Image (spheres, rainbow, N blue to C red):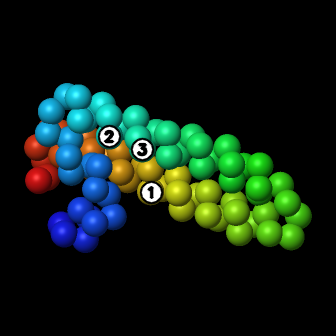
Amino acid sequence: MDTLKKFFPHAFKAVDVTKFITSLIIYALIDIVCGVVIGILAKIPLIGFIFGLLGSIIGLYALVGAILTILVFVKVIE
C-alpha cells in the first residue's frame, strides 16, 4: 500500500466528498490535458509512436488513480 500511496497521492486523500470530487477532477484533468498535448505530438512522423505509447501510459495512470479514489472513498481500501 505504501507504494500505491507514493504513486497516487491524491487518491488516498479522498476521505470526504469535497476531497473525493477534487481528486476525481485532478485525475480527469491529467487525462484530458495530457491526451490533447500527446495527441498533437503523436502526429509527428518519426517519434509519434513513442508519444502514442506515452499517452496510453498516462491515460492508464489517470484511470487507476480515479478507481483508487473511488475505492478509498467507499472504504474498500485504506
**In the rendered view, does 27 fall on the left or right side of 39?**
left
Q: Amino acid at mark 1?
A: Tyr
Residue denoted by label 1: 61
Contact between labelled residues 1 and 3, with CB atoms less than 8 Å apart: no
Pointer 2 and pointer 3: residues touching (CB < 8 Å)? yes
| Residue 7 place in picture, x, y as percent | 33, 64
User: What element does badge 3 sit on?
Assistant: helix
Q: CA distance from mark 3 to mark 1?
A: 8 Å
- Of callouts 3 and 1, the N-terminal one: 3
Counting the numbered discs, the total is 3
Q: Is residue 52 visible?
A: yes
Mark 3: few/some/many CA within 10 Å (<14, 14-19, 20+): many
Residue 49 location (% of width, % of height): 75, 66
Q: Say which amino acid is labelled 2.
A: Ser
Mark found first going from the N terminus, 1 or 2? 2
Task: Pick the quarter of the image with the N terminus.
Answer: bottom left
- Disc 1 or disc 2, which is closer to the eye? 2
Q: Residue at x 25, y 35 (%)?
A: 20
Please state the horizontal and vertical placement of residue 68, each as a whole percent of the image. 28, 50
Q: Name which residue lies at 32% across and 58% down.
A: 8
Task: Say above or below: 76 vs 61.
Answer: above
**Element on which disc 1 rests:** helix
C-alpha separation, residue under disc 2 versus residue under disc 3: 6 Å
10 w.r.t. 47: above or below: above
Residue 27 is tagged as 3
Check disc 2: other Cα within 10 Å, few if <14, some if 14-19, many if 20+: many
**What amino acid is at disc 3?**
Tyr
| Foreground of the two, 10 or 70 | 10
Disc sitting over residue 23 in the figure: 2
In this picture, residue 6 sits left or right of residue 54? left
**Dot 2 lies on which element?**
helix
Q: CA distance from mark 1 to mark 2?
A: 13 Å
